[in-house]
Image (cartoon, rainbow, N blue to C red):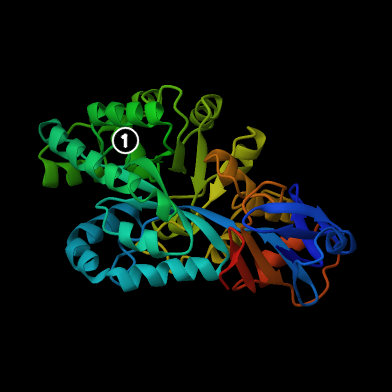
């Protein structure tokens, strides 16, 4: 048994002073230090410094590890030139992305407080690394393929990768399914994957309306994707529409990534059908996708998470860097309210979306914690979320299921 006694504890989406937490692999009690020491006289007391804040471990819901070798290779600014550069440099980047590179990416997330992350896997090459990293991993086996003639082959490969991830549950892997996007997955494949997710109760994710080019293609079969599909797939027709894609999930809750170009009506439809959004502010900026209006999500009471995406469209995998970007991007939400929303988007929101027994400091939850030290005493309890985001580059302590990792 261990007792942690921070100056400030993040509990029930707010901060409390002079409250300690006792835990083994799970949280056993939350009370004053005096009461916990009486209740657990043999517990080890973890000493913290002044101005310490204890959070539940952070959750990064959307990461691509397979392109972690990218630094300056890919082209940023607009989505289609970036996609062209991915196609052009794909083999080189994937071959350079060995286990050491991917483990370094996991460690970067670890030092930013991430105890659980969602890995979007196109090929399954990062599965070994995900079994070795201390973090828990929602392993999203991605389905891609818009050509009906290759559907059977692609679906067979997808099922094989999904089966392999199921064999790794004892290593902290949570098997899951990802749909690449409306433009890249044939409706037949989509329906098969959604059926599996629903039948087996697996987490489900999908890229959705990331860029203006995607919306133009799905609505009008025009724009940058027209020449892309003509060049690589000899077609001028989209395999689905926005409405057909949304309806295909058939009351199977999914985590839709980006949704920058979704209308309010589309967001309302998704929300009414139990879906949620993964927001990747730096990726959206670097690829010229626009700004997700999270003020609309707030008004609609729609759950969302904040995620880093991968190093193919970002310069770090630090969830703290991502929160700082979010603070600067969303100018229409009051600053301290925005900071609170962003902290919630990497703790309780993703835990609830994916039914994880974490994301909250609450009795019975897994003992996943991120400890940070503020440089000075905060001016108020309400300001702690904002000051955490502004001043924290790395966490000062990290526990996963009660084991101290950092």
Towards the viewer: 374 or 55: 55
Towards the viewer: 22 or 348: 22
Q: Where is residue 302 in the image (x, y as percent from the top left)?
A: 60, 35
On the image, numbered disc 1 is attached to which residue?
182
Towards the viewer: 340 or 28: 28
Q: In which quarter of the image is the C terminus?
A: bottom right
Towards the viewer: 168 or 251: 168
The residue under the point 47% across, 50% down is 290
Quarter of the figure with residue 194 = top left
Position of 127 with respect to 170 (left or right) is left
Q: Where is residue 192 in the image (x, y as percent from the top left)?
A: 28, 28
Position of 196 with respect to 188 (left or right) is right
The residue under the point 19% across, 46% down is 228
Residue 397 can be seen in this image: yes
Quarter of the figure with residue 298 = top right
Position of 144 with respect to 340 (left or right) is left
Q: Which residue, as the protein is rendered here, is positioned at the far right?
A: 34
Q: Quadrant of the N terminus?
A: bottom right
Labels in figure, total: 1
């Amino acid at each position: 048994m261990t007792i942690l006694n921070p100056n400030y504890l993040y509990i029930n989406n707010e901060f409390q002073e002079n409250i300690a937490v006792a835990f083994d692999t799970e949280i056993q009690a939350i009370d004053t230090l005096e009461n916990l020491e009486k209740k657990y006289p043999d517990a080890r007391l973890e000493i913290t410094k002044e101005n310490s804040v204890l959070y539940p471990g952070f959750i990064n819901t959307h990461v691509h590890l397979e392109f972690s070798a990218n630094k300056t290779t890919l082209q940023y600014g607009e989505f289609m030139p970036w996609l062209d550069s991915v196609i052009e440099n794909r083999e080189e980047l994937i071959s350079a992305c060995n286990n050491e590179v991917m483990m370094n990416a996991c460690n970067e997330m670890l030092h930013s407080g991430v105890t659980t992350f969602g890995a979007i896997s196109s090929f399954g090459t990062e599965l070994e690394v995900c079994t070795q990293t201390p973090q828990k991993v929602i392993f999203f086996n991605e389905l891609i393929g818009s050509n009906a003639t290759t559907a059977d082959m692609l679906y067979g490969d997808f099922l094989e990768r999904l089966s392999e991830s199921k064999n790794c549950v004892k290593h902290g892997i949570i098997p899951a399914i990802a749909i690449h996007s409306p433009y890249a997955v044939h409706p037949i494949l989509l329906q098969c994957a959604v059926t599996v997710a629903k039948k087996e109760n697996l987490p489900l994710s999908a890229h959705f309306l990331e860029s203006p080019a995607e919306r133009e293609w799905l609505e009008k079969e025009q724009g940058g994707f027209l020449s892309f599909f003509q060049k690589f797939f000899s077609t001028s027709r989209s395999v689905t529409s926005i409405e057909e894609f949304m309806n295909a999930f058939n009351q199977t809750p999914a985590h839709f990534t980006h949704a920058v170009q979704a209308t309010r009506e589309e967001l309302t439809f998704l929300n009414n059908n139990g879906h949620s959004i993964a927001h990747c502010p730096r990726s959206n900026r670097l690829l010229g996708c626009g700004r997700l209006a999270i003020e609309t999500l707030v008004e609609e009471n729609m759950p969302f998470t904040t995620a880093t995406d991968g190093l193919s469209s970002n310069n770090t995998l630090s969830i703290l860097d991502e929160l700082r970007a979010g603070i600067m991007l969303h100018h229409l939400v009051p600053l301290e309210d925005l900071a609170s929303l962003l902290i919630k988007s990497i703790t309780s929101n993703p835990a609830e979306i994916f039914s994880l027994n974490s994301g909250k400091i609450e009795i019975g939850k897994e003992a996943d914690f991120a400890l940070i030290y503020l440089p000075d005493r905060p001016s108020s309890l309400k300001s702690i979320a904002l000051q955490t985001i502004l001043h924290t580059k790395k966490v000062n302590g990290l526990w996963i299921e009660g084991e101290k990792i950092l």
